[in-house]
Amino acid sequence: MFFFLIASVFAESIVETVNNHPGATWVAVEYPPEVITTAKLRARLGAIDLNEGPSNYVPDTSLPDNFDAREQWPGKILPVRNQEQCGSCWAFAVAETTGNRLNILGCGRGDMSPQDLVSCDKVDHGCNGGSPLFSWEWVKHSGITTEECIPYVSGGGRVPSCPKKCTNGSAIVRTKAKSVGLVKGDKMQNELYSRGPFEAAFSVYEDFKSYKSGVYHHITGKMLGGHAVMVVGWGVEDGTPYWLIQNSWGTTWGEQGFFKILRGKNECGIETTCFQGTFAC
């Protein structure tokens, strides 16, 4: 009980520090435990092998000042999902990027299966994390199936063995990427505008847990680990440029499951570890 009281006080102090910070461009809130706790946050951070090098991001002035993939491709961007208490963010980012890009091409298969990667990708580490590079290479060589075929069941942290058939007994059909690769900073906007959402991984600090709205930038707290998400847009809010990001923590966190993060400063490394796959119908 004493531990939880201390944790609560510490979390509140982070909220107060952020909301009282004169340079803050975002609002922090104390979420109820059913939404997120520090322990739950730690369990969800599963992106490894982040690129710590500098970003070469420059704004692409040939593109609109504001862009949202949900508006560009209405009905094609799949809803926010919830990885729960498993460090499977890396698998969700790959599955969601794949599903959206297939939808945009006109051959969507609905939600793609993060569980396929969590259970079957032998290069990565299930609920203990995965590499953006290795997981995309896995999809290129082995493919990924649909959520209908292999539903997500690792929300509690348990990773079952790789199934031999779909849950309905049919054969597993996997979609392979034609090509995969790094999205460099100076190509991020063009990649998103031309082909659709892609994966980005970044370093998560303690204050990120309390994000409610606005344009996030790190203010207080130590670094806890790496997290993989999906970039779906960009824009400017009250003079502050941002990336629009779809998270995999459900819709009760952040801006209905989305968040904005400072653009152009490689905030938390958001502009150095971005990956994508290309597909064909």
Image (tube, grey):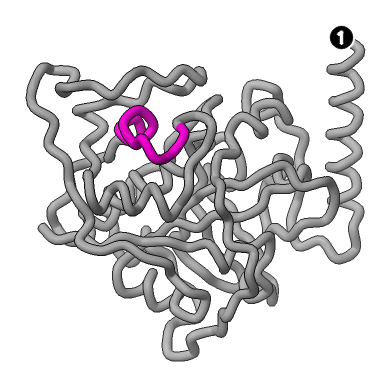
Q: Residue at x 72, y 42 (%)?
A: 224
Instruction: Give the percent coordinates (x, y) of residue 37.
Output: 71, 28
Classify residue 119 by image quadrant: top left
For the residue pair 44 and 141, the one nearer the viewer reads as 141
Classify residue 209 by image quadrant: top right
Q: Is residue 36 above or below residue 107?
A: above
Q: Is residue 191 above or below residue 62?
A: above
Counting every numbered tag in the picture gives 1
Type of amino acid under label 1: Met
Instruction: Give the percent coordinates (x, y) of residue 103.
Output: 21, 54
Tell me the SS state at disc 1: loop
Q: Residue at x 42, y 20 (%)?
A: 159
Q: Residue at x 55, y 72 (%)?
A: 235
- Give the residue furthest to the front: 123
The residue indicated by pointer 1 is: 1
116 in magenta: yes
Q: Which residues are magenta?
A: 114-125
Q: Residue at x 35, y 52 (%)?
A: 136
For the residue pair 40 and 184, the one nearer the viewer reads as 184
Quadrant the C terminus occupies = bottom left
Quadrant the N terminus occupies = top right
